Amino acid sequence: MQENVTTVSSERCRIGYVTRVQSFSACHRLHSKALSDEENKRIFGKCNNPNGHGHNYNVEITVRGKIDPATGMVINITDLKEYIEMAIMEPLDHKNLDKDVPYFADVVSTTENVAVFIWDNLLKFLPPNSLYEVKIHETDKNIVAYRGE
Ligand SMILES: Nc1nc2c(c(=O)[nH]1)N=C([C@H](O)[C@H](O)COP(=O)(O)OP(=O)(O)OP(=O)(O)O)CN2
Ligand SMILES: [Zn+2]
């Protein structure tokens, strides 16, 4: 009887969450083509400064999945590092988000939209339905999370 309990317990599907943190630096300007210059100034204030401003963004990428009994891993972090390099670092690091990243030509480069951009890019590399959350610390005080909804 005890043997049975042990077997069932060891076969149980365990779900884990793996988070990798990545930093990148970029500059941007909050400006919407859908708004007038006056509205842009009123809504975005100092962040609408025509010459922009910079951030050291800290991104937390969380992957959810079954802890593989054979490997002990939800995802190999070595693989996740490569996906982050391709999905975040190559397109965004040391870039002017509005001028260097075509996605932001017509999309306001708020942290919400940067999170969506990163989410969509990571989906190209990660196993289906495994990306759980992209959380961005734009500053120590400004934090945005996106879960693909
Ligand atoms: N919903 C959002 N609001 C704002 C965003 C954003 O991405 N989403 N971004 C900004 C600006 O980019 C700006 O850089 C943030 O500046 P600020 O709040 O001043 O930054 P700090 O928290 O570091 O500054 P404190 O002066 O210490 O408050 C604005 N809004
Ligand atoms: Zn900013």
Image (cartoon, rainbow, N blue to C red):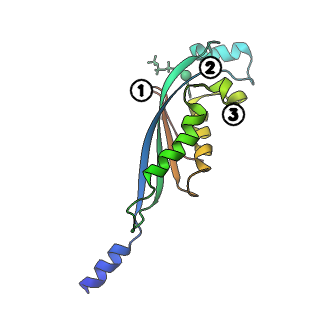
Residue 82 is situated, as x and y percent measured from the top left of the image, at 51, 46
Residue type, label 2 = Arg
Residue visible at 57% across and 42% down? 86
Queried on whether the Cβ of the residue with tag 2 lies below 8 angstroms from ligand 2, the answer reads no
Name above or below for residue 11 compared with residue 84: below
Closer to the camera: disc 3 or disc 1? 3
Tell me the tag on residue 140.
1
Q: Identify the residue at horizontal 65%, vertical 14% (top origin).
A: 41
Percent x, y for residue 73? Answer: 40, 59
Q: Distance between the residues labelled 2 and 3?
A: 14 Å
* Quadrant for the N terminus in the image: bottom left
Identify the secondary structure beneath mark 1: loop
Q: Earlier in the sequence, mark 3 or mark 1?
A: 3
Reply above or below: 5 against 132.
below
Q: Residue furthest bottom?
A: 1
Q: Which mark is residue 103?
A: 3
Tell me the quarter of the picture where residue 72 sits: bottom left
